[in-house]
Amino acid sequence: MKKLKIIVVMPAYNAEKTLEKTYKDIPKSLVYKTILVDDGSHDKTIKIAKKLKIQTFVHPQNRGYGGNQKTCYTLALNEGADIIIMIHPDYQYDSKLTEHLIKPIAEGHFDIMLGSRIRTRNEALAGGMPPYKYFSNRFLTMLENIILGQNLSEYHTGFRAFHKKVLLKLPFHKFSDDFVFDQEILISAIQKNFRIGEIQVPVRYFPDSSSINFKKSLKYGLETLFNLLKFFLSQRTK
């Protein structure tokens, strides 16, 4: 892995309370650099990022979660990254597990790796995941596995890694600027026959961690279902 240029990207929005903790857990000996894209935060996220000497790019206006990721991946590819890791800077995900996340990609076993928070129901709920989010996650994941022909335990994680060839091949700039970007990029990767693996990561929901509200969650769920329908119909016409 030492021969690979590994870059962490963090799509940030009002992450002042959790950014430093998340960043300090990233294994610096493994990572070439960390790039943070601030999506029009109204707090001290940019100030803290600069204090930590993180390479920072600022959107003057909020472009949305998907729009933020588009900038993240473009900047990482421009830096010559071989593997790009996306970590939400809200401390929901354990950055110390970065090496375990990317090792299967570095060894050529997978093209994409996901950090799944779903090992058991009790563990997920005890970690603070709201029940409605747990059950909607389970429903969507079950449906996605059936339609997409996969066997993953979670599609909805904010801790994921990509080999550069995935991002160079997929038209991710055409995907949504909203939360459903996460599902569009995975569905597109499956259509292109990229291999997706996963590791288990702890569940960490707490007051300072970011979380979309019920209304936005519902919109995200409906948009995910619509994208699954499009995939299903495209497969039927082949």
Image (cartoon, helix red, strand yellow):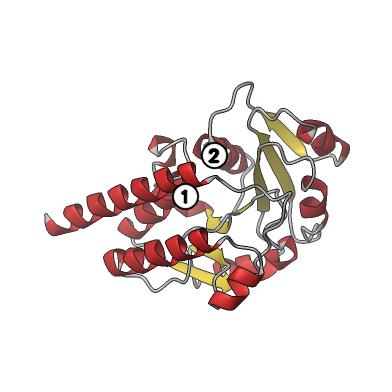
The reply to whether residue 47 is visible in this rendering is yes
Q: Given contact means CB atoms under 8 Å apart, are the residues at marks 1 and 2 in contact?
A: yes
The quarter holding residue 160 reads bottom right
* Residue depicted at x 75% and y 37%: 55
| Three-letter amino acid code of the residue under disc 1 | Asp
Disc number placed over residue 182 in the picture, else none: 1
Q: Position of residue 53 (x, y in %)?
A: 84, 39
Q: Say which of 206 and 141 sits in front.
A: 206
Picture quarter with the C terminus:
bottom left
Q: In the drawing, what numbered circle is on residue 213?
A: none
Residue 75 versus residue 227: which sits nearer the camera? 227
Q: Is residue 238 visible?
A: no
Q: Secondary structure at mark 1?
A: helix
Percent x, y of residue 154: 48, 66
Residue at image point 50% right, 47% down: 214
Residue, x 45% and y 44% (percent of image)?
A: 181
- Residue designated by label 2: 65
